[in-house]
Amino acid sequence: MDVSPHAAPQWVDALPSRTFSSDDERHAKLWSSLSEVCRMLGLPPVCRDGDVMFQHVKFKPAQRVYTAGQSFESLYIVYSGFLKSVLLDESGHEQVLGFPMKCDMLGTDGIDSKFYQSELVAQSTAEVIVIPFRTLVDLSKKNLDLELEFLAVMSREVIRQQHLLFNLCSLQAEARVARFLYALSQRFAGIGYSSTQFTLRMTRQEIGSYLGLALETVSRVLGAFQEEGLISVERKEITLFQPEALRALKRLPVRRRFSSYG
Amino acid sequence: MDVSPHAAPQWVDALPSRTFSSDDERHAKLWSSLSEVCRMLGLPPVCRDGDVMFQHVKFKPAQRVYTAGQSFESLYIVYSGFLKSVLLDESGHEQVLGFPMKCDMLGTDGIDSKFYQSELVAQSTAEVIVIPFRTLVDLSKKNLDLELEFLAVMSREVIRQQHLLFNLCSLQAEARVARFLYALSQRFAGIGYSSTQFTLRMTRQEIGSYLGLALETVSRVLGAFQEEGLISVERKEITLFQPEALRALKRLPVRRRFSSYG
DNA sequence: CGGGTCCTTGACAGATTTCAAGACGTGTGG
DNA sequence: CCACACGTCTTGAAATCTGTCAAGGACCCG
């Protein structure tokens, strides 16, 4: 199922068909208004162009919303489901950039060069709202505050990456994983899920890539957290017992295992 | 000279005075037009509001252009000199986010919350162009393409951070330092300096913070590069002998030093 | 049921940090 | 002009963390 980087034609069949026929899709919400989009992005509801509607598109797990090198046409807002955003290097190695979920905006890295620099991959059935950039530009001419608000959304993305950078540079493995779990819990809370009990949609490998760690390290750290009673972890099912402890965690108390002189 | 984080009044005296009296400052260029700003940002020269001018402000080494928590009023474009952008955590630890130089735009992390999230510190005498955000918004109403272009500039910043993330996550120390030197050399070339011979304005500590390494590691890796004949390093004076080798470097050939059985 | 992916766990190697000491340079004040 | 203090850089040795390799078990899906 892996698509080699920059292989132009391959992503085409990962795009959804324009025709909706299955029962599942017939019942799905197919359009969102501009004001709904603004609400999802947390923007002030200044925009009242009630007529403008944006199409929804559904993706199945492992399908790509866009791929690196594909020409930039639209921004995307996650309506439902879970995805991952990845960067591919020359040799096909995959670097995870984030795990977008409901209300996240994606695709901004294509604005400058007019080609997406990263890939957006569905990890579950996912529904995204398509915002054709051309439409956005046109709308901005009528509603002068709109483009301004999009600057704010991009500002948020810059800040998110700054914090990620900080985590990678100044924290060691345990703290990185702890903060990852805490941040994830906060995001789940923000979209109406439980903040203390959830299912990881991504593999240890992907978490490791995101945090700059080997998958085994992620596995070990999760195990250690469980030992300490901070969390419960059973494959992908996670329960946080002490979220605040995770937020503040620097390093776990040393516990000599297998030592004969303790 | 260190300013403790979030200490509100302290940054005030780091701001430049509005009166220019010294000989040095009298001869400085004090204003830039919008079209000049667009040119510096690499934007198409669509903007012809010839009348709009932006003020220049000068800073001495260690002075702060803005600080974390300060209310967001303006974006800044580096006109000359060298700076560093840093994030401060609760305990005052400093995380370097970048080393801005000529033509770089800063301050975008304040757009969303209306407060700067990071700090911009001069590392040499530096001159920045002040773009009041209010002015930018007003201009956008007349020139509809302008705000669009600023989205593109922010898009570039997002991409820069994506690559930084990739470097931190998937490369080890030697490759990080090598790519850092290569990228620096390219940037120097871009603003008219030599790409093969330059002076590092930042300390090993700051490079280490930026790359997620200890300062000693940076020092050692630079030493190793010199041993290999890739560069020459004498304190802050750097000469690149094989820039391309640095760009592609994964790891240095192992060289057993101090081993008695070789 | 079989194949594949994902996860866990151990042992080990290797990379990087930490700690420590000394050299080098620079700026300041006597 | 020199001495001194300070920040920076280098270098070594030891400690520690994390990655790598390997094997086995759990789970899922066709």
Image (cartoon, coloured by chain):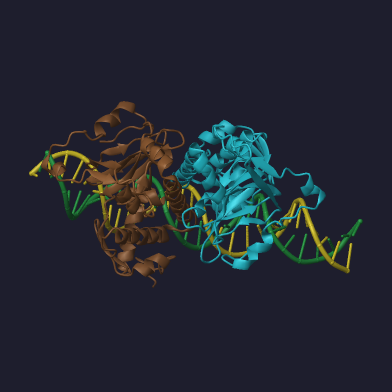
Chain colours: A brown, B cyan, C yellow, D green
* Residue at 38% over, 53% down: A43
Q: Would you say residue B216 is visible in this rendering? A: no
Residue A214: percent from the left, percent from the top?
37, 50
Residue D10 falls left or right of residue A205: right
Residue D24: percent from the left, percent from the top?
21, 52
Q: Farthest bottom residue?
A: A262
In front of the other: B169 or B90: B90
* Residue at 76% over, 52% down: B20
Q: Farthest top residue?
A: A9
Q: Would you say residue B36 is visible in this rendering? A: yes
Residue B200 falls left or right of residue B95: right
In front of the other: A219 or B253: A219
Residue A195: percent from the left, percent from the top?
29, 63
Residue B252: percent from the left, percent from the top?
53, 39
User: How many numbered tags mark residues here?
Assistant: 0
In front of the other: B250 or B96: B96
* Residue at 67% over, 58% down: B15
